[in-house]
Image (cartoon, grey):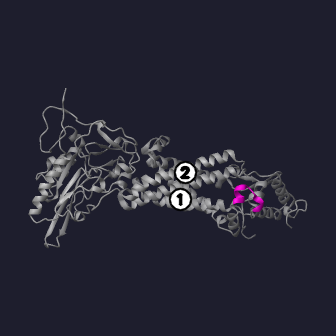
Amino acid sequence: MNDMANSPTTAVSNPPVQPTEAYFNAGDIVRISATRNVPQPDRQLEKLAKLIDVSKCIGCKACQSACVEWNDTHPEIEENVGVYENPHDLTPNMFTLMRFAEWENPATNDLEWLIRKDGCMHCEDPGCLKACPAPGAIVQYSNGIVDFVKDNCIGCGYCVTGCPFDIPRISQVDHKSYKCTLCSDRVAVGQGPACAKACPTQAIVFGTKADMQAHAETRIEDLKSRGYENAGLYDPAGVGGTHVMYVLHHADKPGIYNELPENPRISPIVEGWKGVTKTAGLAVIGLAAVGATLHGLFSRGNEVEEHDTEAAKTLVVEGRDPDEDPHKGGPA
Amino acid sequence: MAHRPYYSERGDRIESRAPVEVSRYRGFTRANHWVTAFCLIALALSGLALFDPALYFLTALFGGGQITRWIHPIIGVVLFVSFALMFIQLWRLNMPKPEDTTWVTKIGDVVKGNEDNLPELGKYNAGQKFVFWGMTGLIVVLIVSGVLIWQQVVGHLVSVPVRRVAVLVHALAAVAIILVFIMHVYAAIWTRGTLRAMTRGTVTGGWAWRHHRKWLREIASRDTKGPAE
């Protein structure tokens, strides 16, 4: 029998020579899209996180290459249009993308090249999962990984609508939604994500969320000592924290890193759509349908009466206005 | 050439005299109506399936989630075209008339069936006009918001904030149109003798006299002026 893998604490270690069993599985799922009352697992896995230190990134795109290789995706070859982003955006075949921003720091007049590795943030409160209408198409494990289950995905794009970070992309080939899996398949056997493994400067590191927060602290301290007084950790509370976090040298202005949202949260419109609109809407429809059926069954209905038929005959056959008929006593 | 009829369509006519029957809708309009009705029901079922997980099982009617997602907007386009054709035929007699105000203020008599207290009406009463214009407005809202969230066609061209508004508007309009639909079906059944207008195409003279007297009077007057049978 194979050994059981341990929850990974780093991305740098090499895998064992012996095959290992996954240390978590479907039994560790805590949330399932479009499913109420998910049975909660008996155990709580150690919370994991990927930490991306923007200040250490050199923009080499090794993470993108590693992602493509591990996930066996085939992003289209595009035209060079004079920007560093390649491909132009996240796609169903490119789960992570280096986004480049040139920012003039008003305090120092320096031009700063801000490179942010974009991709799924693995929110503790995932907007995609909340918006998804297909049972089991999106799941969240107790270690924080949010994963798309391709077989259950119907390609409606509601996850795109729900995501506060504009991450999922729907394939026009198989009409399924794709995004970073946090390499759940690697993590399950004790390995870190491919991007973190490949990063030559260890700008991307991986481990328990607590370790990553502690590591971020030392990085922030270092950055502050170098004059980046607003350096900080991006772990936004509005989505319950994320399992992909950034160390930013200008944490007070996340927007300068290619529109990283300042206070991401599930949009109130999405909450309203999936909340009160759904509940109240269905209640009103149900009441109307039941009310109409019952009333239809038990009320007499508006029947045509004998004198209506007679009147029509008088009008049509005899060509007289029935209202002028003295026997009816109607108005003259 | 007579001037355009005010309370009826040119094609509305006395179909038979014993018993009196009046042609209300010809074959094309009826087929048009049933295509629209079928589409609306299919859209409601497939839409509700994707609206609440508790109703996701309805996707089985269409062959699964993927097919439901694919076919819903296509049926939507068919309904839009079908309704547009119907709109062209029906809008004129659905324009508001002074007697509609009186009818609405006497809604209590409408519900109690005290037709004697109500004004004489043309081809449609204010309730039918409400259904017509409600359907018209909601279908426009639904097609516009629906196209904006049509993933397979518009894909990622529509920005996420716009999609969010569109998906909410689409849901609200869908709830509203289902309510209008329930009202339409209920009224057609409660007002006995109405359904045959959309099946056989004719109504009885008594029905026409009771509910749409001005309509019947106009048709009858046209009928007597015509050549003798």
Q: Position of residue A108 (x, y in %)?
A: 13, 72
Taking B90 as reference, is B54 above or below it? above
For mark 2, what is the residue? A285
Q: Chain of mark 1?
A: B
| Amino acid at pointer 2 | Ile
Give residue A286's position: percent from left, percent from top: 55, 48
Q: SS for tag 1?
A: helix
Asked if residue B150 is among those painted magenta in the image, a careful observer would answer: no
The reply to whether callout 1 and callout 2 are in contact (CB within 8 Å) is: no
Residue drawn where x is 20% and y is 52% of the image: A64
Range of residues picked out in magenta: B108-117
Amino acid type, residue under disc 1 in the picture: Ile
Left or right: residue B71 compared with residue A104: right
Position in image of residue A249 (x %, y %): 16, 62
Element class at badge 2? helix
Q: Is residue A276 left or right of residue A261?
A: right
Which residue is pictured at 19% across the width and 68% down the height? A103
* Label drawn at residue A63: none
A286, A102: nearer the viewer: A286
In this view of the protein, can residue A66 be seen by the observer?
no
Q: Quadrant of the C terminus of chain B?
A: bottom right
Return the residue nearer the eye: A60 or B9.
A60
Question: Which subunit holds the residue at mark 2?
Answer: A
Residue occupied by mark 1: B139
Is the stretch drawn in magenta largely helix, strand or loop?
helix
